[in-house]
Amino acid sequence: MQIFLFMIGLILVVGTILSAIGSFVLPRGAPDPLTRWVFYFVRLLFSVPLKIAQSYTIRDRIMAFYAPISLLTLVPVWYTLISFGYSLMYLAIGSATWIAAFNLSGSSLLTLGFHSPNGTVQTILDFSEATFGLILVALLIAYLPTMYAAFSRREVAVTLLEVRAGSPPSAVEMLRRFHRIHKLENLSEHWRTWENWFADIDESHTSLAPLVFFRSPRPEHSWVTAGGAVMDAAALSLSTVDIPDDPQAALCIRAGYLAYRRIADFFNIDYNPDVHYPDDPISVTRQEFDTACEQLIDQGIPLKTDREQAWQDFAGWRVNYDQVLLALASLTMAPKAPWSSDRVETTILPPLFNFRNS
């Protein structure tokens, strides 16, 4: 029985430490069941005021606290599990009662020092528990600046996009403004900037997963809809606008849908990775596409003469990211934006944590 209690306690402690390493230290997306449950439980608590909220602005203010509170909740959860695990080990090696084991564990973990260990084994466990307690706090302190640096990089590009694509961002508006100000032939540098942006969120939003739920400072901004507008604009420029083909636009789209797919993979969002139009439909209708073309013509933007082929080409690009774009917009409760979050229902409590890959 003593060996069994000690092993259960050891497994709890090791599992908790691995959870902290996977969340704070490991430089890759490693889905952690414990972290998922914490975020899901906090989302469950947030679902109550979200259902009562009468407007998107109020829901956005509520959701702004979701990721920070979930992140800070991880530390007391880890402390509780470590304390419980060490209590079992102290009980297994000689503590007279559960209360005595718990007091020793709490005193060691929080470095309070009001309860002294007895014997060499208890002393070793006491020192190791105090060390783990300090490490967890140090990890969180070191983790936050890195995460907020990535958040700042993301939001600079999202904010600058408002100048070029309006608010909420629109692919049609982006092309119209470039035509008036920069000339469409100068889009290449814009695509290169956003290719780098997609590569950045691909890395940061899987290795620092809470960033997915950190909301933009302005309610009408969203990293999901911003990336969607850029990919749509690139798809329109390649398929519909009568300008020389720019390989950089194609690279931008590919970087975008790969980034969104990998973030979707982290959250176990189902999508078809091998899609082809017309076998796989897209959420943008032919009528919406034709309306966008008319808006572009009204601004004097030259379009390709074969409208049917232009639609087929646009749909062929869009099908690569259509599913994941809508799924991430729903997951993050993104503000309404054309051709993305305007065609999904806001999910107060989405099925965030499918454990088939965890």
Image: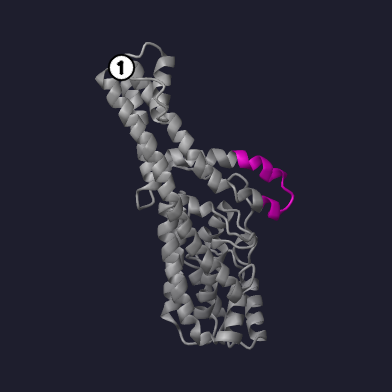
Above or below, 78 against 178 in this view is above
Q: Where does label 1 land, which residue?
A: 118
Q: Quadrant of the N terminus?
A: top left
234 relative to 207, above or below: below
Give 308 or 354, whichever is nearer the viewer: 354
| Element marked by disc 1 | loop
> Is 58 covered by the magenta stretch?
yes
Q: Residue at x 59, y 47 (%)?
A: 65
User: In front here: 127 or 3?
Assistant: 127
Q: How far across and how far down the image is residue 347, in percent?
A: 62, 49
Give neighbour class at mark 1: few <14, some 14-19, many 20+ (Cα, 10 Å): few
Residue at x 51% of width, y 75% of height: 234
**Does the stretch in magenta take in 157?**
no
Magenta extent: 45-59
Residue ID at (45%, 56%) = 205
The image shows residue 164 at horizontal and vertical percentages of: 58, 76
**x and y percentages locating residue 192 in the rendered image:** 44, 75
Q: How is the image coloured?
A: one colour
Q: Quadrant of the C terminus?
A: top left
Count the marks.
1
- Observer able to see residue 358: no
Task: Looking at this view, name the residue that lies furthest to the left.
Answer: 120
Vertical placement of 142 versus 40: above or below?
Answer: below
Residue 203 shows in this picture: yes
> Mark 1: which amino acid?
Asn
Q: Position of residue 343 (x, y in %)?
A: 63, 60
Q: Main secondary structure of the magenta part?
A: helix
The residue positioned farthest toward the top in the image shown: 96
In the image, is 22 to the left or to the right of 320?
left
Q: Residue furthest right?
A: 54
Q: Quadrant of residue 338?
A: bottom right
